[in-house]
Each structure stands twice: as structure tokens, then as C-alpha cells.
Image: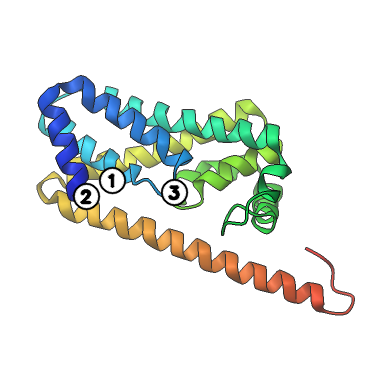
Amino acid sequence: MAEKIDAQIAFLASQGAFWIYLFLFFSSFIENLFPPYPSDVVALTGAYFIYTAQLSIALGFVMVVIGGLSSVMILYFLGRNKGVRFFQKNRGPFLNMEYLEKIKSWFGRYGEKVLLVSRFMAGIRTVIALGAGVGGVRTGKMVAYSGISFILWNLVLFSLAYLFRTNFEAVVRFIEVYSTTVLISAVLLMAGWLIYSRLRRKKPGGKQI
């Protein structure tokens, strides 16, 4: 996967800097709408090419942040307008009523601070954005906290691309492993929570979660 992205960005670089920036924007934009698109690897590779080609790293960074934040807000308003019905019609591992209740419990316990770490939680970022809309998080706080999360996460990616530009493949592999590990951990935690909640419901006098 990384080799294909590398080849794509190399081709775009040969066509002009504008296409690299545009590619970074749309890659970050569609990642939240069509997971598991590897936007983190795209951002890493794009940053690497921007550094090596001596292009504007600030512009590349802004394109990634704005692209991702735009799609997150679409999901937020989708959750806010469609609400619980959106989760009732889905039966995926994350898009279901049980997981919605889990996300809502996170917001109930930690508040909007969940959004600050959302970009570091690969695999469930989309559900967090939807859950924020369903949970009634204020639009201003959604933009602010999600924006900070995007900035922090992409600072990590762009810094890694610069610091390890001489061993770039190792950094890409690290991010791929990190994303996969977080996703698997989320699935296992979700499965454990579902089993636990159903067992509690079966107990005499057990309170429903």
C-alpha cells in the first residue's frame, strides 16, 4: 500500500506542486467518510515529498488539517440531524446502538475532551464524530477540539517524516502497525464490552446498561 501511495505522489509531484496539495486535502477529507482509507500514510508520504522538494510545508499541513476537519464536520452534522436512527439502521462492528451507547458514555464521563484524542484513535474516528453529533456537542466545541486534535496528530506525522526522512519506509511501517494495533484493540474492547453488558442483562435484578 505504501509503495502505491509513494508512486502516486511521485507522479503528482512531476505534474506540479498544486496537485500534491490537492491530493493531500482530498485524502484527508475522504478518510473519515470512507474508512479505512490510509490518510495517515498519505500525509506522511506527502510531507516527505514536500520536504525533499522544498515546497511549502505550512501549506501542505494546512491542506491536511482542513481536509480532515471538513469531513469530520459532515459526520458531526449527519449524527446531529439523523441522530439515533442512523445507528439503528446499521449493523456494523462500530455502527450499531450498543457502540453508540459506549461513545455516549465516553462523552458523559470525559466530556468533549474525547475529541482531543480522537485523531489518535485510528479505526473509530468516524464513530466518535458521529457520536458527538448524536450526543449534542456544541458546534463551536466540535470545531475547536477536533481542530486541536487534527493539528496535534499531523504535527506528529509531519515531524516523523522530517526526522526520519533518511529511513522513511520504517516510519511508514510504524504508522501502519500503530493504526492496525489501535483498530484491533478497539474491536476487542468493543466485543468485551458487548459481552459484559449482555451478561449483566441476563442476571436477576441486573441493571441495563
Q: How many marks?
A: 3
Q: Position of residue 187 (x, y in %)?
A: 52, 64
The residue sitting at the front extreme is 89
Mark 1 vs mark 3, foreground winner is: 1
Q: Position of residue 195 (x, y in %)?
A: 66, 73
The residue sitting at the right extreme is 205
Q: Which residue is mark 3?
A: 120
State which tag comes first along the sequence, 1 or 3.
Answer: 1
For residue 74, say whether it is visible.
yes
Residue 133 vs 171, above or below: the answer is: above
Q: Quadrant of residue 160?
A: top left
Q: What amino acid does circle 2 point to?
A: Ala
Q: Position of residue 98 (x, y in %)?
A: 68, 59
The span from disc 1 to disc 3 (Cα, nearest Å) is 14 Å
Q: What amino acid does circle 1 point to?
A: Val
Mark 2: few/some/many CA within 10 Å (<14, 14-19, 20+): some
For residue 57, say whether it is visible.
no
Q: Position of residue 90 (x, y in %)?
A: 63, 51
Q: Is there CB contact under 8 Å for labels 1 and 3?
A: no
Residue at 28 percent of width and 46 percent of height: 41
Q: Quadrant of residue 162?
A: top left
Q: Which residue is mark 2?
A: 2
State which tag comes first along the sequence, 2 or 1.
Answer: 2
The span from disc 2 to disc 1 (Cα, nearest Å) is 7 Å
Q: Is there CB contact under 8 Å for labels 2 and 1?
A: yes
Mark 2 vs mark 1, foreground winner is: 2
Mark 1: few/some/many CA within 10 Å (<14, 14-19, 20+): many
Q: Which residue is mark 1?
A: 41
Secondary element type, mark 3: helix
